[in-house]
């Protein structure tokens, strides 16, 4: 008879691992926005983006800035100036109604801060 090696995790370990992973997951829904990080805090970021607003009297558009607070997951490395994607979720606090999904590009890779004087 061959002996079984106990290299795999027990059922109880797997259950606790799944439960601990589910605690960190926040279900998302609704709108998705992309913008630049203007401020960073330990658990959240402030994302700012511009949108056009139509003025019927003058038949013109003007740029309006929108600032949203988003929860920053522990495993993400986000810095000020990064271009990120956020998605709406349930209210997490008084001002946080969004969660960071992904980093589109970092601040060093391009944008307003990088000058091309050739």
Image (spheres, helix red, strand yellow):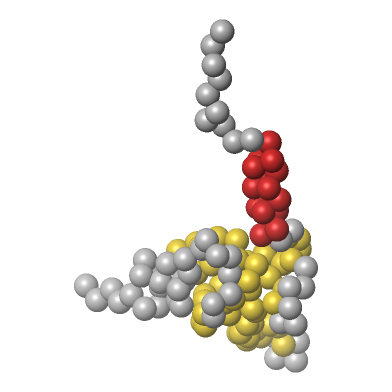
Whether residue 50 is visible here, answered yes or no, is: no
Q: Residue 103 in the image: state x and y as whole percent.
A: 51, 63
Q: Residue 108 in the image: state x and y as whole percent.
A: 36, 70
The image quadrant that residue 90 belongs to is bottom right
Q: Residue 27 in the image: state x and y as whole percent.
A: 74, 58
Query: Is 75 on the left or on the right of 66, as rendered?
Result: left
Whether residue 11 is visible here, answered yes or no, is: yes
The residue shown at (66%, 85%) is 60
Pick whichever, 20 or 57, lies toward us: 20
Vertical placement of 95 versus 4: above or below?
Answer: below
Pick whichever, 70 or 109, lies toward us: 70
Query: Is 85 on the left or on the right of 98, as rendered?
Result: left
The image quadrant that residue 109 belongs to is bottom left
Quadrant in which the N terminus appears? top right
Pick whichever, 95 or 5, lies toward us: 5
Q: Residue 59 in the image: state x and y as whole percent.
A: 70, 86
Vertical placement of 87 versus 116: above or below?
Answer: above
Query: Is 84 on the left or on the right of 86, as rendered?
Result: left
- Residue found at the very far bottom of the displayed protein: 57
The residue shown at (68%, 36%) is 11
Vertical placement of 22 versus 76: above or below?
Answer: above
- Residue found at the very far top of the displayed protein: 1
Quadrant in which the C terminus appears? bottom left
Query: Is 107 on the left or on the right of 22, as rendered?
Result: left
The residue shown at (63%, 73%) is 70
The residue shown at (60%, 61%) is 101
Number of marks present in the image shown: 0
């Amino acid at each position: 008879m061959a002996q079984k090696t106990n290299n795999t995790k027990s059922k109880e370990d797997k259950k606790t691992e799944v439960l601990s992973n589910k605690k960190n997951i926040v279900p998302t829904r609704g709108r998705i926005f992309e913008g630049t990080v203007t401020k960073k805090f330990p658990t959240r970021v402030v994302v700012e983006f511009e949108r056009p607003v139509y003025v019927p009297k003058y038949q013109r558009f003007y740029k309006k800035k929108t600032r949203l607070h988003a929860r920053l997951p522990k495993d993400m490395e986000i810095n000020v100036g990064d271009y990120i994607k956020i998605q709406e979720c349930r209210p997490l606090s008084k001002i946080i109604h969004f969660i960071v999904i992904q980093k589109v590009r970092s601040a060093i890779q391009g944008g307003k801060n990088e000058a091309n004087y050739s």
